[in-house]
Image (cartoon, helix red, strand yellow):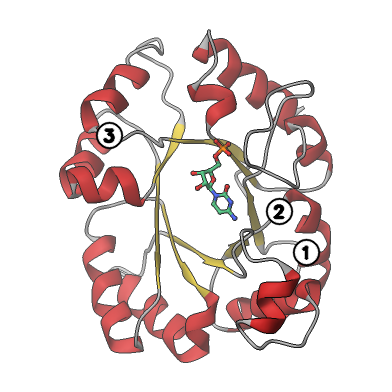
């Protein structure tokens, strides 16, 4: 049921730089792309429409987290942008997640995929315990948030490729895992800590890998994108 694909993280500060990057691909090759807060806050819905017009599938990574009514109304606006995937924080809890599904669903019953962020990978076990006052260990917290997301009707979670198998065994085979933290073997790790190659992520059962700098900073971006897709899809 899952489509499985590489999603290129467009972490650029302006629409012009984003389009210059995408112009390096041949006309018929349209990667699935992720628009995050930096680009969306700089350019607004216009950049989403521009990339949609060019034929890209879009993951709008805005990580909504607010009271249920606000998230429902915001999701309703995002559904009209015709993106393919959006996300929210599972920490907003089940009532907010159910409201999000409702808001996102169009009159004809269709909607973009809705994915939950569990615990940010920048939150370590010490912060979880001392600052967020969560005594449950990190892995169980992540799996429990994923379970809440599944029970609320969401389609999957953003997680580390190292957690994909555990998420699937807890939430079901069809529950999607969208995984950043991807690096080619021998590549620059940057600030990512828990990483996996595209090939290993494919074998680990990840549905979508999110790849930023290994593609956007590569000398030959098209070659890097094709290599990620070939390795991941096998
Ligand atoms: O450049 P890199 O491949 O590290 O980019 C990964 C992308 O995935 C970035 O847009 C980053 O914000 C996003 N992401 C992440 N870890 C998470 C959630 C999102 O790296 N837990």
Q: Earlier in the sequence, mark 3 or mark 1?
A: 3
Residue under circle 1?
168
Q: Secondary structure at mark 3?
A: helix
On screen, 82 above or below 95?
A: above
Identify which residue, 135 or 157, lies in the foreground.
135
Describe residue 96's horizontal placement relative to residue 46 as left or right. Answer: right
Residue 53: mark in rendering: none
Residue under circle 2?
160
Q: CA distance from mark 2 to mark 3?
A: 27 Å
Contact (Cβ within 8 Å) of mark 2 with mark 3: no
Residue 175 pos. (x, y %): 67, 64
Q: Which residue is located at x 63 percent, y 66 percent?
A: 123
Of discs 1 and 2, which sits in the foreground? 2
Q: Earlier in the sequence, mark 1 or mark 2?
A: 2
Residue 25 pos. (x, y %): 41, 13
Number of numbered discs overlaid on the protein picture: 3
| Residue that protrudes farthest toward the left in the picture | 46
Q: Secondary structure at mark 2?
A: loop
Residue under circle 3?
51
Contact (Cβ within 8 Å) of mark 1 with mark 2: no
Q: CA distance from mark 3 to mark 1?
A: 31 Å
Report if residue 1 is visible in the image. Answer: no
Identify which residue, 3 or 145, lies in the foreground.
145
Disc 2 CB within 8 Å of nearest ligand 1 atom: yes
Residue 107 pos. (x, y %): 25, 72
Q: Secondary structure at mark 1?
A: helix
């Amino acid at each position: 049921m899952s489509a499985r694909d590489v999603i290129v993280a467009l972490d650029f500060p302006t629409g012009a730089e984003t389009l210059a990057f995408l112009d390096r691909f041949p006309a018929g090759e349209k990667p699935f792309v992720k628009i995050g807060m930096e680009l969306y806050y700089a350019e607004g819905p216009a950049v989403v429409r521009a990339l949609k017009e060019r034929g890209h599938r879009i993951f709008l990574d805005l990580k909504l987290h607010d009271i249920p009514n606000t998230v429902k109304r915001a999701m309703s606006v995002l559904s009209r942008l015709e993106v393919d995937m959006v996300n929210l924080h599972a920490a907003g809890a089940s009532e907010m997640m159910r409201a999000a599904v409702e808001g996102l669903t169009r009159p004809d019953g269709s909607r973009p995929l809705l994915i939950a962020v569990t615990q940010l990978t920048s939150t370590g076990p010490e912060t979880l315990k001392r600052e967020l006052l969560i005594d449950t260990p990190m892995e169980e917290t992540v799996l429990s948030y994923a379970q809440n997301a599944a029970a609320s009707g969401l389609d999957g979670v953003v997680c580390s490729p190292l957690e994909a198998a555990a998420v699937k065994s807890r939430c079901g085979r069809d529950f999607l895992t969208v995984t950043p933290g991807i690096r080619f073997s021998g590549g620059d790790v940057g600030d990512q800590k828990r990483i996996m190659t595209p090939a290993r992520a494919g074998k680990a059962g990840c549905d979508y890998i999110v790849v930023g700098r290994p593609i956007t900073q590569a000398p030959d971006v098209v070659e890097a994108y094709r290599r990620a897709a070939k390795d991941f899809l096998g």
